[in-house]
């Protein structure tokens, strides 16, 4: 409640001051005609309700679209690492192949964090520490769009893997399609971030809302008297809260509690990818163990024949 009411504390203070001053004026100058039909503010309130409902729906659509895009980021990140782990040829279970897959997976984790930070206008380089090598960080710093630079590094490693015949052409195309989907999702997030909700629309709603608050005491003077002060303040707070809620939802990447939880989603992606990577490493260790056992058996067999 402290956070919610703190967003409209100025509006509540102004409505409260206005209603108190109005009742004082009406109390001491009771002979002056200040009453108006309650139907007038009622009609204005109905119009405001329709406008706020429309704005809230449009704002929620933007928020939900952002959440859908980040849901696709989760799916495509898992798909990308699965493709890299399974497509990359490694018949000898080499350390080089293991490092390639691990670096690719960590770089994708870094991409998710950097995308969320860049959308929130925060430092997109900071999440890369510990996930990306120093040489790659130097390369990324030369680009204004950090997530796009990370995708370029993905594509570079993918090309090198094909040249080294670790993956074939068809596998390269499949992985590149996944990278293209990630790039498309990044662009959708940037479109939501950079597309400004029409300011004139918000201004008209605010002007109509202020007119409603100004006229409401005139329709309640003969009915509630001093009890109109808390009632009008509560009504004004309700309308201003709905308006502020819509304003927050229409910008889902502003680092607010109501935003799309990009950091939490990136944490989920990190856990999933690391689990996939650990399972691959476990499988790698088991296969190496079996391979060593086969080598030992072969040596024992050769020694037996020699003896």
Image (cartoon, helix red, strand yellow):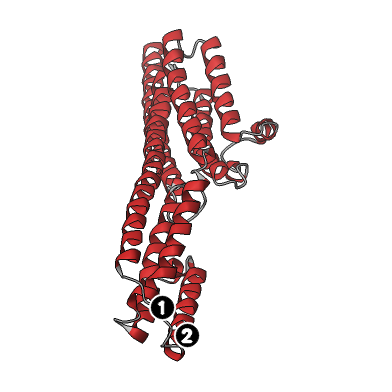
Relative to 127, residue 175 above or below: above
In depth, the one of 229 and 128 nearer the eye is 229
User: Residue, x 35% and y 72% (percent of image)?
Assistant: 36
Q: Residues within 10 Å of mark 1 (few under 14, many from 20)?
A: some
Q: Residue at x 48, y 55 (%)?
A: 256
Number of the label disc, if any, that sits on residue 306: none
Pick whichever, 219 or 116, lies toward us: 219
The Cα–Cα distance between marks 2 and 1, rounded to whole angstroms, is 10 Å
Asked if 172 appears above or below 105 in the picture, the reply is above
Q: Residue furthest bottom?
A: 28
Instruction: Report whether 220 appears left or right of 193.
Output: left
Which one is in front, 33 or 207?
33
**Can see residue 284?**
no
Q: In screen coordinates, is 225 left or right of 144? A: left
Report x, y in % for residue 110.
53, 38
Q: Earlier in the sequence, mark 2 or mark 1?
A: 2
Query: Vertically, is 6 above or below 126?
Result: below
Can you say which quadrant of the picture contains the C terminus? top left
Q: Position of residue 28 (x, y in %)?
A: 46, 91
Task: Give the residue pinned by disc 1.
Answer: 34
Q: Determine crowd level at label 2: few under 14, some 14-19, many 20+ residues with C-alpha closer than 10 A.
A: few
Of helix, strand and loop, which one carries label 1? loop
Seen from the viewer's position, the closer of residues 169 and 100 is 169
Q: Which residue is mark 2?
A: 25
What is the x, y in percent for residue 169?
46, 8
Q: Which image quadrant for residue 178?
A: top left
Q: Is residue 28 visible?
A: yes
């Amino acid at each position: 409640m402290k956070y919610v009411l703190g967003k409209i504390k100025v509006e509540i203070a102004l409505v409260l001051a206005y209603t108190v001053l109005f009742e004082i004026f009406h109390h001491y100058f009771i002979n002056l005609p200040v009453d108006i039909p309650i139907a007038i503010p009622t009609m204005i309130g109905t119009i405001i309700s329709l406008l706020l409902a429309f704005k809230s729906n449009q704002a929620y659509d933007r928020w939900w679209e952002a959440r859908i895009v980040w849901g696709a980021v989760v799916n495509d990140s898992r798909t990308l690492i699965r493709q890299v782990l399974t497509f990359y040829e490694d018949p000898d279970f080499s350390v080089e192949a293991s490092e390639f897959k691990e670096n690719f997976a960590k770089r994708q984790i870094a991409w998710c964090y950097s995308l969320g930070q860049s959308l929130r206008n925060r430092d997109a380089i900071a999440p890369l520490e510990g996930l990306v090598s120093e040489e790659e960080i130097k390369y990324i710093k030369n680009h204004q769009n950090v997530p796009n630079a990370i995708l370029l590094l993905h594509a570079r490693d993918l090309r090198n893997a094909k040249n080294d015949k670790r993956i074939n052409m068809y596998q390269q195309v499949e992985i590149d399609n996944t990278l293209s989907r990630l790039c498309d999702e990044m662009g959708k997030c940037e479109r939501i971030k950079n597309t400004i909700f029409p300011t004139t629309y918000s201004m008209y709603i605010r002007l109509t809302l202020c007119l409603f608050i100004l006229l409401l005491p005139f329709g309640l003077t003969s009915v509630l008297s001093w009890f109109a002060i808390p009632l009008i303040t509560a009504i004004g707070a309700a309308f201003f809260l709905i308006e502020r809620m819509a304003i927050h939802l229409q910008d889902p990447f502003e680092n607010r509690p109501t935003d799309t939880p990009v950091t939490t989603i990136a944490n989920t992606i990190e856990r999933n990818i690391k689990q996939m990577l650990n399972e691959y490493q476990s499988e790698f260790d088991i296969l190496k163990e079996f391979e060593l056992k086969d080598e030992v058996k072969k040596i024992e067999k050769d020694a037996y024949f020699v003896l």
